[in-house]
């Protein structure tokens, strides 16, 4: 089915594979990227700026070169809507540096997983491994929060369900239970006060982990 959609859109099997490897999973998007002058090898310049294929086409129609379009997009400007503040921001925004191979692959992996380009860019630029970042990025967890939550032992799904900044969670649990146990008690559905009470009465973090597993079903 997937190959047929690409063939109908005018792509060979090899071209379709190259676009998918570059993180472009929809034939319609690949056609827009191609209209903007991008190839599977060069599309990462636009993707890293958090640009949509439609944005790229509009920049292309305005005659803006890819790297300049990326810099303008990163400064907050959008095609055809430049204000004086946006112009000043653009002048102060350096052109994006070339990605090293590891970060480029992380970006492409996240894009292949369906993560929006603006979210994928933040994770890749922060140095995340694509496999480690995927679960967090798909749930739109702020990458800085994700680092803290992961260090505390939370899963991406648990952090997303909390819907709170990591520092707020840490502050609310500070001193209630040992730091290494926060994820088990919190993910089991207990408040810091409840967890402290349970722990004082002899309930262990291992027992809380059982409740945590049940709550994740």
Image (cartoon, rainbow, N blue to C red):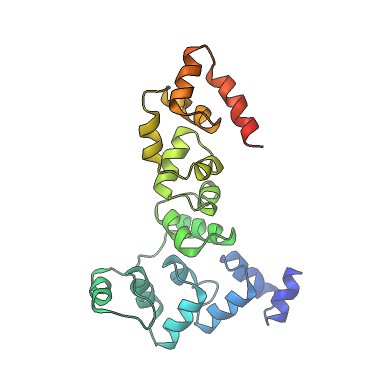
What is the quadrant of the N terminus in the image?
A: bottom right
Left or right: where does residue 152 sit relative to residue 215?
left
Question: Residue 89: which quarter of the image?
Answer: bottom left
For the point 39% across and 87% down, which residue is it?
63
Residue 163 pos. (x, y %): 47, 45
Left or right: where does residue 84 sit relative to residue 141?
left
For the point 53% across and 61% down, which residue is it?
108
Above or below residue 152? Residue 56 is below
For the point 28% across and 68% down, which residue is it?
94
Left or right: where does residue 61 sit relative to residue 10?
left
User: Which of the pair 81/36 is nearer the observer?
Assistant: 81
Above or below residue 144? Residue 1 is below
Residue 122 pos. (x, y %): 42, 57
Residue 34 pos. (x, y %): 55, 81
For the point 65% across and 69% down, which residue is it?
17
Residue 199 pos. (x, y %): 49, 16
Left or right: where does residue 88 sit relative to residue 153?
left
What is the quadrant of the C terminus in the image?
A: top right
Count of labels in the image: 0
């Amino acid at each position: 089915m997937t190959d047929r959609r690409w063939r109908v859109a005018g792509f060979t099997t090899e071209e379709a594979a190259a676009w998918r490897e570059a993180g472009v999973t929809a034939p319609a998007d690949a056609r827009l990227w191609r209209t903007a002058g991008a190839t599977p090898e060069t599309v990462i310049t636009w993707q890293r700026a958090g640009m949509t294929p439609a944005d790229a086409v509009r920049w292309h129609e305005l005659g803006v070169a890819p790297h300049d379009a990326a810099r303008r997009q990163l400064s907050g400007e959008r095609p055809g809507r430049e204000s004086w503040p946006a112009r000043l921001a653009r002048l102060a925004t350096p052109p994006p540096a070339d990605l090293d191979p590891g970060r480029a692959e992380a970006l492409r992996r996240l894009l292949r997983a369906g993560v929006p380009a603006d979210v994928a860019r933040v994770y890749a630029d922060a140095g995340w491994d694509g496999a480690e970042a995927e679960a967090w990025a798909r749930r739109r967890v702020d990458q800085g929060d994700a680092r803290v939550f992961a260090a505390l032992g939370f899963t991406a799904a648990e952090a997303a369900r909390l819907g709170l900044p990591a520092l707020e969670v840490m502050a609310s649990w500070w001193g209630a239970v040992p730091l290494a146990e926060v994820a088990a008690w919190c993910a089991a559905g207990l408040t810091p006060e409840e967890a402290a009470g349970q722990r004082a009465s002899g309930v262990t973090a291992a027992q809380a982990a059982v409740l945590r597993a049940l709550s994740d079903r």
